[in-house]
Image (cartoon, rainbow, N blue to C red):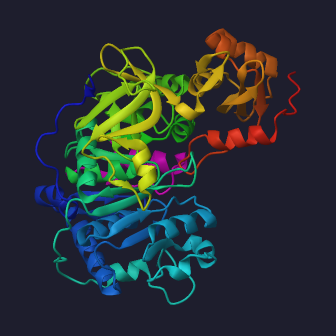
Amino acid sequence: MPIEGGPLAGSPPHLDTILQTGCEADPEATAIVSSARKLTWRELDAASDALALAYLDMGLEPGDRFASLMPNRVDLVLHYLACFKIGLVVTPLNYRYTPREIDHALEVSEARALLAHAERSDDVATSRVMPEVALGPVWCEGAGPGPSPRFEALVARGITGKPRLERPEPSRPAGIFFTSGSTGPSKGVTHSCDTLRWMFASAVAGLEFTRDDVCLPGSSMSHVGSFLWTFAALSVGARVVVARVLEAHEMIPLIRAQRPTFLAMLPAALIALVRDHDLRPEDLASLRTCRCGSDKVSVELLAEFSALAGFPIDEGYGMTEVGLVTVNPPSGMIKQGSIGKPVGGFALSIRDEDGSEVGAGTVGRIWIKSRSQMIGYWNAPEATEAVVRDGWLDSGDLAHADAEDYVWFFGRKKQVIVHDGSNISPLEVEDALLEHPAIALAGVVGIHDLVHGENVRAYVTLRPGHTRPKSDDVIAFCRERIGYKAPEEIVVLDEMPLNPTGKVDRTGLKQLAEDHLHPADDRR
């Protein structure tokens, strides 16, 4: 039987009324704050109304895709809210995108306008697709080339009143989010008005958000993760703290000033924060939950955070296609290393290659069903049909469930290494490597071998101040912990390649491995 997360009570707010709870409860309370700006619920509602009316005045119409190329800003949240209020389709682009990736996203989405930070003006100006974007760019925090409008001016025009448009049909597109492209060109994951609001409701239930929470989403708001935490919190009247950059010099003062109750970060950013010499245990005293995910959380990070904060990291699992799928219940039992249990509104099934469910403890593919499931990949029906069957979404990820329905992540099917007929999870090898005192980051891939099928190659970067350890010593260190799964090769890099979402880019490492089948490593 599928593992059920339980039903969701009531009906979540519509996208155009997502601020209603906060506005009605205390309109003069702070709704959103950053190191540079603060808005009350009344101000946030009025500013997003004015911006929505200005967007209509520009010539945008319901259903138009409005792309954004923005770092974390209060203005980005304003933009999303304005789009929700008039039925525009938010289309966030990863702020780390190269010009080629920007062009791909604009071309696929057929965006009619682009909100861009002025520091990306050179890339936007050289875009081959930008001339086809009918209404051109809107510049934020500075002017770009040409007569294009300024975001701040649109808000400051102060057009008063409420946008009076018919609410879009629940099935109409409301957001397009591009995948990280780990299995090919980025696809546009499309969510409707209905799937987004159910996605927010499931996150509220799973993370136990209330009006008393202060939410600090410590990753990019152009990705589904922080986008989701932001709007789930706003939907229940909780305050949102915007981290303009994700480094300790910004995060620590924000944590001290705003006293968040909920913090969400990617593993690489969180371990850098935890190891910063300025962070003190009392800085984390306001937190009830620290959610870490999007990539495997190392045993080392679990231990270091728990020692500093006095409580464990709460791991979970999610996908752009569906939102937050599982999490360790914040007020229940947290099993360290597990990605938790399905949240409300979700059903999860672990299946073998034939599509049959497997028993507890057996690794299989994660299949997911929920009301927050995407309506498809934008203009890519064949790609949609490849992963959605009979209402279930095949994640392509591997996991097993225990007897208490907690789920344990094993890895992506295409990244699992098959050595002498045994499946090896790169995540488990990376965990062992990260326990080594000299290793800062690790990425593990399989290398074709005529005898063994695949051998395990590890790419690592070193911590500042540490001399390079002998490769044989690192391999022996891993064998003490994971036996036959230990790597056969260690390659030291000056810098670890990361994908656009900030994870170790195993696809890039795989390509690097194929380009250099026999690395020059002296195995000292």
Inspect this view and state whether residue 313 appears: no
Identify the residue at horizontal 43%, vertical 77% (top origin).
113
Image vertical order of residue 263 relative to residue 361, above or below: below
Residue 516: x, y in percent?
82, 39
Residue 164: x, y in percent?
16, 77
Please state the extent of the stretch shown in magenta in the rendering. 237-260
Image vertical order of residue 165 relative to residue 456, above or below: below
Residue 458: x, y in percent?
71, 29
Image vertical order of residue 150 relative to residue 370, above or below: below
Q: Quadrant of residue 17?
A: bottom left
412 vs 149, nearest the viewer:
412
Q: Which quarter of the rendered picture does the N terminus lie within? A: top left
Callout count: 0
Q: Is residue 468 left or right of residue 323?
A: right
242 vs 414, nearest the viewer:
414
Identify the residue at horizontal 33%, vertical 56% (top origin).
191
Q: Quadrant of residue 135?
A: bottom left
- Asked whether 121 falls inside the magenta stretch, the response is no
- Asked whether 252 falls inside the magenta stretch, the response is yes
Inspect this view and state whether residue 437 appears: yes
Identify the residue at horizontal 32%, vertical 13% (top origin).
403
Image vertical order of residue 470 relative to residue 507, above or below: above
Identify the residue at horizontal 15%, vertical 55% (top origin).
21
Q: Which quarter of the rendered picture does the C terminus lie within? A: top right
**In the image as oriented, which residue stretches furthest toward the bottom?**
147
Q: Is residue 123 left or right of residue 194?
A: right
306 vs 130, nearest the viewer:
130
Residue 142: x, y in percent?
51, 78
